[in-house]
Image (cartoon, rainbow, N blue to C red):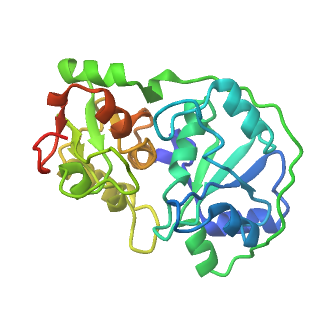
C-alpha cells in the first residue's frame, strides 16, 4: 500500500542487477557507493576502487558536507550539494540508488538517501541488503571507476525534514515533536563511550526515546518488513501519526529512523543534523542525561 503513495525507498539487488544487465544505467538511473568507515578500520575509497557495483560512483560523505562546521557531519549548502551530485551525473530527473559496504547491510546509505530528500529530490532509493548481499548473491562487480557525464542539479532545502539545535531546544518546552535517538543503548544511557570521540561523553537529550538503528535490520542485513517496523515503534510508544525528530551522534544513523518510518508510510520525519555531537557542546547541562560517572553528560 505504502509504495503506491510514496516513492519506493528500497530497491532489491535483483532489480538493480537486472537494470544494469539491460543497460538502464545512465542519466535516468545512477548508483552511488556511500561507504564510510571509522578511521583505522576499513578504507572506503580503496575498497570502492577494488570492487563496486558496475556503474556506481563513489559518494564521499567527507567531501559532501559543511567542512567549516565544528560538528561532525553537517549538511553542505544547497549550492555545495548541487555541485557535488551534478558532477556525479545526477540531475533532478535521475533515479538515484544508494548502497554501502557495511557488514550490517546498511549504515551510511540512509544518510545519503535523506540528504537527497532534504535537498528536494524524491526519486532516491536504498539498495536493500547493501553491497554485502550484492556479493553474497553473486551479482557482478567491477574495479572500473565510473565517469558519468556531469549534469545540472538544482537543490532546494526542505526545512520540514531538518531540525536545528534551536528547534530541538524549543521542543523540550513545547513537546510538539517526539524525539527518537538511534544509537546503541549503552551510548544512549551513558554507560558506554562514544567511539572515536575526543571530549564527547555519551548520554542523551532529555525526553528522547532510544531505538537502536540495528533493530530495523534483519540478521542478513535487509530492512525489516513494514509490519515488523511498526511493531518496533509501537513497543517504544512512538506514535507514527504524530511529528517526529530523529537524532543520534552525528545525524547519520538517525536517518535509519527516517527510513524505517517512511517504510511505514510516514515520509515527514525530521533529522536533527547536529545531533549529540552538537547538543553535548551547546546545550544546558540539565538537558543532557547520562548514567555515567558524573550523572550528567
The image position of residue 228, as x and y in percent, is 31, 59
- Can residue 42 be spotted in the picture? yes
Q: Quadrant of residue 295?
A: top left
* Viewport quadrant of the C terminus: top left
> What is the count of numbered marks?
0
Q: In which quarter of the image is residue 200?
A: top left
Question: Which residue is pictured at 54% across the width and 24% down the height?
Answer: 158
The image position of residue 260, as x and y in percent, is 40, 49
The one of 180 and 75 positioned closer to us in this rendering: 75
Q: Is residue 169 left or right of residue 28?
A: left
The correct choice, above or below, for 72 with respect to 55 in the image is above
- Can residue 93 be spotted in the picture? no
The one of 99 and 1 positioned closer to us in this rendering: 99
Q: In this view, does 121 lie to the left or right of 193?
A: right
Question: Which residue is pictured at 38% across the width and 55% down the height?
Answer: 226
Q: In this view, does 234 lie to the left or right of 276?
A: left
The image position of residue 28, as x and y in percent, is 79, 46
Question: Which residue is pictured at 83% across the width and 58% down the height?
Answer: 146
Residue farthest along the front direction in this orientation: 199
The correct choice, above or below, for 279 with respect to 21 in the image is above
The image position of residue 176, as x and y in percent, is 25, 22
Amino acid at each position: 500500500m505504502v509504495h503506491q503513495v510514496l516513492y519506493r525507498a528500497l530497491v532489491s539487488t535483483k532489480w538493480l542487477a537486472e537494470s544494469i544487465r539491460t543497460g538502464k544505467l545512465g542519466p535516468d538511473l545512477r548508483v552511488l557507493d556511500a561507504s564510510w568507515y571509522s578511521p583505522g578500520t576499513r578504507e572506503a575509497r580503496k575498497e570502492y576502487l577494488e570492487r563496486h557495483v558496475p556503474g556506481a560512483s563513489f559518494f564521499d560523505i567527507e567531501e559532501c558536507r559543511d567542512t567549516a562546521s565544528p560538528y561532525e557531519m553537517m549538511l553542505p549548502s544547497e549550492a555545495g550539494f548541487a555541485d557535488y551530485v551534478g558532477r556525479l551525473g545526477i540531475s533532478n530527473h535521475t533515479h538515484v540508488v544508494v548502497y554501502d559496504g557495511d557488514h550490517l547491510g546498511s549504515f551510511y546509505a540512509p544518510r545519503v538517501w535523506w540528504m537527497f530528500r532534504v535537498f528536494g529530490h524524491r526519486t532516491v532509493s536504498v539498495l536493500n541488503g547493501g553491497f554485502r548481499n550484492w556479493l553474497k548473491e553473486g551479482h557482478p562487480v567491477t574495479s572500473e571507476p565510473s565517469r558519468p557525464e556531469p549534469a545540472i542539479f538544482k537543490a532546494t532545502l526542505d526545512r520540514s525534514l531538518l531540525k536545528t539545535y534551536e528547534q530541538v531546544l524549543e521542543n523540550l518546552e513545547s513537546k510538539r515533536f517526539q524525539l527518537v535517538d538511534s544509537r546503541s543503548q549503552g551510548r544512549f544511557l551513558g554507560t558506554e563511550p562514544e567511539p572515536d570521540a575526543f571530549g564527547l561523553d555519551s548520554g542523551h537529550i532529555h525526553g528522547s526515546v532510544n531505538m537502536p538503528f540495528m533493530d530495523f535490520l534483519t540478521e542478513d542485513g535487509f530492512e525489516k518488513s513494514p509490519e515488523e517496523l511498526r511493531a518496533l515503534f509501537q513497543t517504544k510508544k512512538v506514535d507514527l501519526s504524530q511529528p517526529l525528530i530523529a537524532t543520534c551522534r552525528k545525524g547519520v544513523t538517525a536517518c535509519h529512523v527516517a527510513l524505517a518510518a517512511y517504510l511505514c508510510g510516514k515520509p515527514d520525519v525530521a533529522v536533527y543534523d547536529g545531533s549529540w555531537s552538537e547538543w553535548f557542546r551547546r546545550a544546558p547541562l540539565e538537558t543532557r542525561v547520562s548514567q555515567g560517572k558524573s550523572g550528567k553528560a
